[in-house]
Amino acid sequence: MTAINEKVFISPGRYVQGEGVTARAGHYVSALGKTALLIADDVVWDIAGKELSASLEGEGVSFERAVFEGEASTREIDRLVELGRKQQADVVIGFGGGKAIDTAKGVAEKLEAACAILPTTASTDAPTSALSVIYSDDGEFESYRFYSKNPDLVLVDTGIICKAPPRFLASGIADALATWVEARAAIRANANNMAGGKATLLGATIGEKCEDILFEHAMLAYQANEAQIVTPSFEAVVEANTLLSGLGFESGGLAAAHAIHNGFTALHGEIHNLTHGEKVAYGTVAQLILDQAPQAELEEYLDLYLALGLPVTLKALKLDQASEEDLYRVAEAALKEGESSHNLAYELTPKQIVHAIKAVDVHARAFMEKVGLSE
């Protein structure tokens, strides 16, 4: 058990980023193992499977591809563990988006195998962390699952990522912009980070730097993504979304923004079609309101979120028809025992969370009117 004032910082064994680095995947993976269980869905495989296969085979890594079925659930992890055992895999490769990555980490932990993560979008900060977000087979948040170590390798090919829809980059920016908002709140409360200890100076600094980079480069990176080109700003934002946000949230701490996101997963309907980051964006503004952030700071976030097409009104969140009972379900889920909402320096009630969710809509629509935008 971690001592009461013990500071903890954790990170992946190696992080590699650049345009075309998939061609070097075999070089890095072969240092971890020679028999790989490769987890990827059909869409991802069609995009870059041939290149990854050639790289692994060229370095003597044999692999069996397992088709990811779409949900980071206990059932899916257990199914893939059985495949890995039959194969006697000594390395698990997660190739794809956030849920495929979280699934691969869970499989590697159970197999006691090395773990290599190759994200194909910069939509979440899942690649670097020693945990998975576990959902039910129906997509409802169930728990965080913590592992004994971070991935051994995270390899990020910006040449692949720049071809993904810009919506995914915007979602990653939203997820990453929650990093410092939540970490600074957890640090103020002297709460434990996701690694089970207090934040180091480095953990806090990474979270703060992540925010700086995103406000400076987000729009330039988004425009580069629209054009499917790799620029210095695009590289900076991919690194912020993936590495800085990943290290910052895990070694800094989570708070209300992600807890409210988790609450949203308790609802059924169109909100399930939104990405993780899109729901986190709304939760981040709600936390800023609960933290009594100055209006100027609140509007800085709203301005960027709106420019990136992120949801900051109940209508955009697909909850304009939600009942009071629905919103209280979100709030109660966000306040469950063990949720990161308890990492704040103040206690929250369901009513306060419901009011914060409504306040996001009120303040966003007022800001939109102020700058001449319509919903």
Image: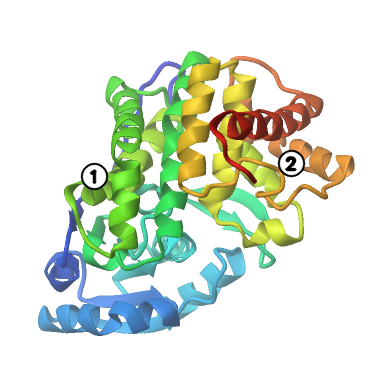
In the image, residue 357 lies at what x, y percent? 71, 34
Number of numbered discs on residues? 2
In the image, residue 345 lies at what x, y percent? 59, 15
Residue 117 lies in what quarter of the image?
bottom left
In this rendered view, identify the residue nearer to me: 298 or 114.
298
Q: According to the image, label 2 marks what residue?
A: 333
Secondary structure beneath dot 1 equals helix
What residue lies at 43% left-to-right and 34% top-to-bottom?
A: 179
In the depicted structure, whether residue 15 falls above or below residue 19 = above
Q: Which amino acid does label 2 sit on?
A: Ala
Q: According to the image, label 1 marks what residue?
A: 236
Q: Is residue 52 left or right of residue 215?
A: left
Residue 271 lies in what quarter of the image?
bottom right
In the image, residue 35 lies at what x, y percent? 26, 78
Q: Is residue 231 left or right of residue 94?
A: left
Mark 2 or mark 1, earlier in chain: 1
In this rendered view, identify the residue nearer to me: 33 or 373.
373
Q: In this view, does 269 lie to the left or right of 324?
A: left
Q: Mark 2 and mark 1: span between their CA atoms?
A: 35 Å
Question: Can the viewer see residue 12 in this picture?
Answer: no
What residue lies at 87% left-to-right and 39% top-to-bottom?
A: 324
Q: Which amino acid does label 1 sit on?
A: Ala
Question: Can the viewer see residue 350 in this picture?
Answer: yes
